[in-house]
Image (cartoon, grey):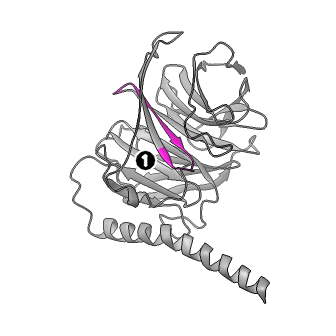
Amino acid sequence: MRRRLVWGTLAALLIAAVAWFKLPALGFYWVSTRWGGPHEGPAVGLSGYRATIEGLPVQGLNRNASGLTFNPETSTLFTVINRPPQVAELSTDGRLRRLIELEGVRDPEGITHVDGDRYVISDEDSHSLYWVRIGPGLGRLSVAGAPSLRLSIDVVDNASFEGVSWDSVHNRLYVVKEKLPLRVLTISGLDVQRESPVFNLAISEWKSWAAASLFMSDLSSLTLHEATGNLLLLSDESALVVEYAADGEPVGILPLWRGFHGLKRKVPQPEGLAIGGDGALYVLSEPNLFYRFEPAARPVWAKAR
């Protein structure tokens, strides 16, 4: 009897936790897709997106893909893998183009394109960020001697800094902490134009004025969409993409659930998020599932294919 009571209590708590995050998200989704909201600024327009590639296994990857970034100069995507640490370059239809051995990090979780062949990689194990170069034909990459930054903020094993995204307009880096607590940090004062950057850092925490509307129990990735200036946050546990305006106002939501936006199944473990210049939105699900969402009509901010 006691065991039944314990299991029943745990089940009730689990249901309550799911409802706590899912019901507000459903409410916001229902209102925003039917009537829109008061936001009058630019937006990605997540409500108009539908899955055009769903759950495609990336051949050649078989484990732990995490993080995602789009390089507009190569028109390709980059992700990181742990066990063993690697960087993978993907086409926009989910084909593996190359694998690059990554030395000097143990648990890479995020990657973002800065400019040219420069990227930032986050290592959850050491709570560090590394500035690296990934040029054409590169097959092995070492972070030894690379400019780096260690963030000893809310250090928790396996619940540290997951995603990174570069904002070239304001020369700052966005970093998300997975949980305990959830955080979105902005780091400015980074002189990334030098081989050995000089740092004059200012670290602040990005918050939505409607922080309770994050709708998320964790944060697994993010992308700063420069064409609109909006921030898109991705949650693995809640299977959601939420778009926020520069002032923190929630302006759009993309549930990665079965039956929404053309999905036949729930995205099982979304870990990477990126947007291409033409408006296509990409999600990478651990260990190696690739998703592409496209808008019904080309957004005004998007470039022609």
Location of residue 136 by image quarter: top right
- Of residues 187 and 155, the one nearer the viewer is 155
Query: Is residue 194 inside the magenta stretch?
Result: no
Is residue 43 something that shows in the picture?
A: yes
Residue 207, placed above or below residue 165: below
List x then y, in percent, for residue 139.
Answer: 72, 21
Q: Residue at x 39, y 44 (%)?
A: 231
Left or right: residue 225 versus residue 42 is right
Q: Residue at x 54, y 43 (%)?
A: 177
Location of residue 84 by image quarter: top right
Per the image, the residue denoted by label 1 is 232
Left or right: residue 47 versus residue 74 is left
Highlighted magenta segment, given as a residue range: 169-183
The local crowd at label 1, few if under 14, some if 14 to 19, many if 20 or more residues have their Cα within 10 Å, is many
Q: Residue at x 60, y 18 (%)?
A: 135
Residue 146, placed above or below residue 220: above
Furthest residue in direction front, as rendered: 2
Left or right: residue 176 versus residue 63 is left
- Of residues 95 and 61, the one nearer the viewer is 61
List x then y, in percent, for residue 125.
Answer: 69, 35
List x then y, in percent, for residue 189.
Answer: 40, 21
Residue 48, placed above or below residue 113: below
List x then y, in percent, for residue 216.
Answer: 49, 58
Q: Which amino acid type is marked by label 1?
A: Leu
Q: How many marks?
A: 1
Furthest residue in direction top, as rendered: 195
